[in-house]
């Protein structure tokens, strides 16, 4: 680390849980963010500001006027652009030292396995069950920690799935096969600050995992009720009969 980096990251280096060694681990890390929308916006912004070495942004969509109410990484001038390009430009303006790789595609099959295999950690910021299950399967197969968040209407959820730990459930242990008919934000609505809150918590969990401090939300599901301002936590056990991770040694 040079003097400019020590100055840039000084406020988090002051924390004994991070210190210089932890900051160096962040600088050496590579992270995949699946979805650069409402959740992915604060995730990408905070991880870039924190000095994560490389961010891989995956999103097949373009910026739309309806996104701007909650997807704070994008501006009005970005309407019609690929979200990954818009996000990468903003991240470079915040921290030009952070590498940013753009994948303007819907990751699946071999492409998804390749992307997951090249990083240290994955953040699922997508908005559909098919993608969430596919990302979960790839993380289980390749032994990569997964930080998963979701928000709709006035409710949010957050958990961490870490196949490196024998006691960790996976996404499918918690949600089963999922409900492909579940409503999206475009159908049910969502309040902007809620996705900002969930995304910020995802970024925090990612920093904890990358540096190695605190206790991540492994085996725990954080439920957020934005209407009444309440947080609840549920314990989640690994399902030995899970079709995805049940056979894991």
Image (cartoon, rainbow, N blue to C red):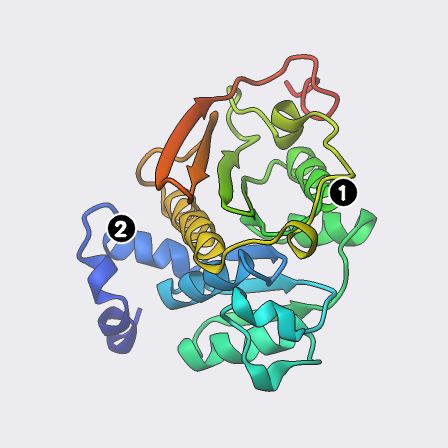
The Cα atoms of the two marked residues, 1 and 2, are separated by 36 Å
Identified at 79% across, 50% down, the residue is 108
Task: Write down the residue under mark 2.
Answer: 18
- The picture quadrant where one finds residue 55 is bottom right
Task: Write down the residue under mark 1.
Answer: 130
Work out whether 35 lies above or below 156. below
Work out whether 249 lies above or below 1. above
Residue projecting furthest to the top: 240
Q: How many marks?
A: 2
Side of 235 relative to 241 (left or right): left
Q: Label 1: how many residues lie within 10 Å, few (<14), some (14-19) or many (20+)? A: some
Identified at 53% across, 56% down, the residue is 39
Q: Label 2: how many residues lie within 10 Å, few (<14), some (14-19) or many (20+)? A: some
Q: Position of residue 149 (x, y in %)?
A: 54, 44
Q: Position of residue 235 (x, y in %)?
A: 46, 20
N-terminal label among 1 and 2: 2
Side of 81 relative to 15 (left or right): right
| Helix, strand or loop for disc 1 | helix
Q: Nearer the viewer, mark 1 or mark 2?
A: 1
Residue projecting furthest to the right: 109
Give the numbered dot on residue 156: none
- The picture quadrant where one finds residue 84 is bottom right
Identified at 55% across, 75% down, the residue is 74
């Amino acid at each position: 680390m040079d003097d400019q980096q020590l100055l840039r990251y000084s406020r988090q280096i002051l924390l004994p849980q991070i210190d210089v060694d932890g900051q160096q681990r962040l600088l050496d890390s590579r992270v995949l963010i699946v979805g650069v929308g409402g959740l992915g916006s604060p995730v990408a912004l905070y991880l870039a500001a924190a000095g994560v070495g490389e961010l891989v942004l995956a999103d097949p969509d373009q910026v739309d006027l309806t996104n701007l109410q909650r997807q704070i990484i994008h501006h009005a001038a970005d309407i019609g652009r690929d979200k990954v390009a818009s996000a990468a430009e903003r991240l470079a303006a915040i921290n030009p030292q952070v590498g940013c790789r753009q994948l303007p595609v819907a990751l699946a099959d071999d492409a998804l396995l390749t992307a997951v295999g090249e990083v240290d950690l994955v953040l699922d910021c997508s908005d559909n069950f098919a993608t969430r299950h596919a990302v979960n399967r790839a993380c289980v197969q390749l032994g990569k920690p997964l930080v998963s968040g979701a928000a709709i209407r006035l409710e949010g959820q957050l958990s961490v799935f870490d196949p490196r730990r024998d006691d960790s459930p996976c996404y499918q242990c918690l949600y089963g096969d999922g409900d492909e008919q579940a409503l999206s934000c475009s159908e049910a609505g969502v309040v902007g600050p809620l996705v900002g809150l969930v995304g910020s918590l995802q970024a925090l969990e990612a920093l904890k995992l990358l540096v190695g401090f605190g206790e991540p939300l492994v085996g725990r599901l954080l439920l957020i009720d934005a209407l009444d301002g309440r947080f609840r936590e549920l314990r989640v056990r690994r399902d030995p009969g899970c079709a995805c991770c049940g056979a894991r040694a």
